[in-house]
Image (spheres, helix red, strand yellow):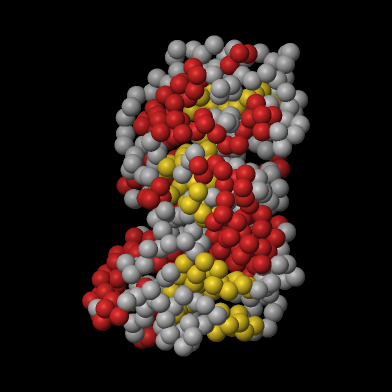
């Protein structure tokens, strides 16, 4: 039975009405609310292995928005906000937010309704977006039928509101995946009956009110493959904002099918190959070229309908299994150089190296939120480069599909004009390694600047469109033409010294208008650099 008191929150506040094209201009910082920041700056112990609440709050996030925005991120994805199961379980407390029991209430450990509204307001005042993590598939319980009682769940509190009890035994059986339960006898995720029309209507009303009440700009959808596909279009229409779906699977055709019913999905198949490609210098980077092709074939708009990530709360952090910092940097760089909207998991900028859950959910206050560390500075450069590429009016960066310009077993060049991302898995122990990129996508004579290098190193495109690069200790490279840089804070002096340049797609008329165009792009780049670094 569904209680009629469902969702009494008033319809107040105003999101930035962000849609897919708006989010394509963004980069997202994912955080675990309980582990990012406390309301007070008193720090304190937090043992990840204990799986207990450590005291992070929405007000704590507000207090450290400078830290996030300083890296260039303009969207923040927070943990699920709904009230979760209370007390200790076999698997600890619900500090992560993924064990909901009451959709009509917030998780009081994170703060109050006013605190969440204040976070939304604080983000919007900075021109940043709020993304909320949403769970549709289940509620949580520490028992299973026949001892399980349902009356404490909200708004669904009868056995008939849930799918009959069964564990998923066969993940190739989609009916089982969608209607059987996740978990075990110690912690069961009780599967909501999303085939029931009344429950569907309730969900649609709930999400509409949630988005309105807290001025939400986007949704991250948990456990998407465990809910029937045709549930999602009406739910997302009711939400009225951009959404990313989590489909944890390594199959391109299976994952890509969900782009038919929602804006984007996390490109999990690519992630599996990305980690394999940079696991060590002996790995095969041809996996990345294959991934680009398979994504184009199986996703609605290719990788343009994906979100690209290198770490998250469900998987071990990459440094836990990859010691080479150049390989770690290269993994992160790939996610900023392609078609997918980039997401960074909190703590990557601090070099955190926790293993599998729960060790990958460390408290960030141990770092004192230092910005004077290698990865923080590196990620800031990546964000700046991507923003400059988006601001280049000679290009259509957000809508132009990336192409693999060149690829070998140990090198890859990804071209997405005006950005050229060049990576190797040779590692930081390697000597200088030369490589000729045969089809850069740029005109002969164009000067490209490696914006990741400390010296803003330049290279000139050859007469045949090729680019000769030298990897130094396995460092990743992100090239932009000087016209994308001009007087920006990112290698701006180098751009001015090198003069104008264009792409293979520029017409002769556009070249003649180079001076005027350079001035326009310069103004845009300066304004954008100020926004990113504010």
Residue 520: where, in percent of width, then height?
A: 25, 71
Please tell me which residue lies in front, 75 or 353.
75
The answer to which of 145 and 128 lies nearer the viewer is: 145
Residue 341 in view of the camera: no
Where residue 183 appears, as percent x and y from the top left, is 71, 30
Q: Looking at the image, which residue is at 40% across and 47% down? A: 20
Q: Residue at x 40, y 30 (%)?
A: 238
Which quadrant is home to the C terminus? bottom left
The quarter of the picture where the N terminus appears is: top right
Figure disc tally: 0
Question: Against 209, is 377 above or below?
Answer: below
Is residue 321 or residue 158 the one in the foreground? 158
Q: Residue 237 location in percent, x, y?
A: 41, 33
- Quadrant of res 171: top right
Q: Is residue 495 left or right of residue 279?
A: left
- Residue at the spot 56% in from the left edge and 54% down from the top edge: 297
Q: Nearer the viewer, residue 251 or 11?
A: 251
| Residue 360 % position (x, y) | 66, 49
Give above or below for 176 relative to 273: above
Q: Residue at x 73, y 59 (%)?
A: 321
Name which quarter of the figure residue 191 lies in.
top right
**Camera sees residue 445:** yes
Q: Residue furthest front?
A: 297
């Amino acid at each position: 039975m569904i209680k009629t008191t469902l969702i009494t929150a008033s319809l107040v506040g105003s999101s930035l009405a962000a849609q897919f094209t708006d989010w394509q201009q963004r980069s997202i910082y994912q955080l675990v609310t309980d582990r990012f920041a406390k309301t007070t700056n008193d720090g304190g112990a937090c043992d990840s292995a204990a799986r207990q609440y450590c005291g992070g709050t929405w007000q704590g996030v507000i207090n450290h928005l400078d830290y996030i925005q300083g890296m260039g991120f303009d969207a923040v994805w927070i943990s699920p906000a709904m009230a979760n199961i209370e007390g200790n379980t076999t698997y600890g407390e619900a500090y992560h937010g993924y064990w909901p029991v009451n959709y009509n209430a917030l998780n009081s450990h994170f703060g109050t309704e006013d605190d969440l509204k204040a976070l939304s307001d604080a983000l919007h005042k900075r021109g940043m977006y709020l993304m909320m993590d949403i769970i549709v598939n289940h509620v949580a319980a520490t028992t299973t039928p026949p001892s399980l009682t349902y009356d404490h769940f909200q708004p669904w509190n009868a056995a008939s509101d849930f799918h009959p009890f069964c564990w998923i035994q066969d993940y190739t059986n989609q009916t089982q995946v969608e209607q059987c339960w996740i978990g075990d006898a110690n912690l069961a995720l009780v599967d909501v009956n999303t085939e029931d029309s009344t429950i569907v209507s309730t969900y649609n009303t709930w999400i509409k009110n949630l988005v309105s009440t807290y001025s939400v700009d986007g949704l991250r959808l948990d456990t998407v493959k465990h809910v029937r596909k045709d549930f999602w279009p009406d739910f997302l229409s009711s939400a009225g904002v951009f959404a990313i779906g989590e489909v944890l699977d390594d199959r391109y055709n299976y994952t890509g099918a969900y782009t038919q019913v929602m804006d984007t999905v996390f490109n999990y198949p690519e992630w599996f190959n990305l980690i394999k490609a940079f696991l060590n210098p002996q790995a095969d980077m041809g996996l990345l070229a294959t991934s680009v092709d398979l994504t184009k074939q199986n996703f609605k708009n290719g990788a343009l309908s994906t979100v690209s990530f290198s770490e998250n709360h469900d998987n071990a952090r990459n440094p836990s299994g990859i010691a080479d910092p150049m390989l770690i940097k290269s993994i992160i760089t790939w996610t900023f150089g392609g078609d997918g909207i980039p997401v960074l998991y909190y703590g990557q900028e601090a070099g955190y190296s926790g293993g599998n859950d729960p060790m990958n959910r460390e408290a960030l206050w141990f770092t004192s939120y230092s910005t004077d560390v290698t990865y923080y500075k590196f990620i800031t450069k990546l964000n700046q480069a991507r923003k400059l590429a988006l601001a280049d009016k000679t290009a259509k960066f957000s809508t132009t599909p990336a192409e693999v310009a060149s690829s070998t077993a140990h090198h890859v060049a990804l071209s997405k004009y005006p950005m050229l991302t060049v990576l190797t898995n040779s590692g930081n122990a390697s000597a200088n390694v030369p490589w000729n990129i045969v089809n850069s996508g740029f005109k002969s004579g164009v000067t490209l600047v490696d914006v990741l290098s400390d010296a803003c190193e330049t290279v000139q495109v050859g007469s045949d469109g090729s680019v000769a690069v030298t990897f130094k200790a396995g460092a990743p490279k992100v090239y932009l033409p000087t016209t994308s840089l001009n007087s920006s804070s990112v290698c701006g002096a180098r751009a001015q010294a090198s003069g104008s340049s264009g792409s293979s797609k520029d017409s002769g008329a556009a070249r003649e208008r180079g001076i005027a165009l350079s001035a326009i792009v310069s103004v845009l780049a300066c304004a954008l650099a100020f926004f990113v670094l504010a």
